[in-house]
Amino acid sequence: MKNDHRVRLTKMLLHRSLISLMRDRPFAKITVKEICERADINRATFYAHYAGTEELLLEIKTEVAEEILRSVNNTVHGSDSCETILEICQSILKNREYCEVLFGKYGDEKFLMNILDTAREQSVKLFRRGRAELPAATLDRVYTYIAHGSVAIIRHWVQSGMQETPAEIAEFIEKVSNGVYQAV
């Protein structure tokens, strides 16, 4: 049990160190030495857990993506798209420290889109419930349109400091998706 706690603590320190460094510069310019110095952990300990910086970043991205996808999976069955977007935004807020970096200047532009693409099939099924008359190709295009717009709004929300609540962002995305706000 004590070893499990140490491993979790070590990994958490390494995660936070990498994220902290990524606030200031691109991932490709960050070294294991810098991560270890920031975490106050020796290189041997780092290499006991990770083969390199890429593996560390992949673990962080995987953990955040899995949490966001859990929220999507928990809501997509029997709920509306607004509730799904709300759950995604709440997961992002919960993982704010990581998401600010992953969606930021030195992060991964495709990270959130990859998550939403994973939920594509479930989301298209949800759309089909309300728009059964539309062909599958049309529903797929509708999903692509809404997903890309949602990603842009969520990324902007995160990059501008998450001033609005997750509910406000979800409601805005829902209204835009339903044509409530239209350009003139």
Image (cartoon, rainbow, N blue to C red):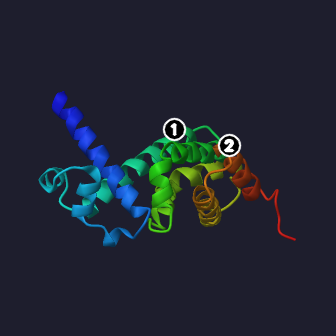
Location of residue 34 in the rendering, given as x and y in whole percent from the top left corner: 26, 62
Q: Report the residue marked by disc 1.
A: 74
Kind of element beneath mark 2: helix
Q: How many marks?
A: 2
> Quick check: 134 above or below 105?
above
Q: Could you tell me the amino acid type at mark 1?
A: Asn
Q: Which residue extends farthest right?
A: 184
Q: Residues within 10 Å of mark 2 (few under 14, many from 20)?
A: some
Instruction: Write down the quadrant of residue 140 in the picture.
Output: bottom right
Horizontal arrangement in the rendering, residue 180 relative to residue 14 (left or right): right
> Quick check: 29 above or below 17?
below
Residues 123 and 180: in front is: 180
Instruction: Write down the quadrant of residue 35 in the picture.
Output: bottom left
Q: Earlier in the sequence, mark 1 or mark 2?
A: 1
Residues 26 and 181: in front is: 26
Residues 6 and 140: in front is: 6
Location of residue 139 in the rendering, given as x and y in whole percent from the top left corner: 63, 61
Label ID, residue 117: none
Location of residue 98 in the rendering, given as x and y in whole percent from the top left corner: 44, 52
Q: Could you tell me the amino acid type at mark 2?
A: Ala
Residue at 62% from the left image edge and 51% from the top image edge:
162
Horizontal arrangement in the rendering, residue 183 relative to residue 153 (left or right): right
Q: Residues within 10 Å of mark 1 (few under 14, many from 20)?
A: few
Horizontal arrangement in the rendering, residue 170 relative to residue 68 (left or right): right
Q: Using the numbered discs, state the Cα–Cα distance from disc 1 to disc 2 in whole angstroms.
A: 17 Å
Q: Report the residue marked by disc 2.
A: 167
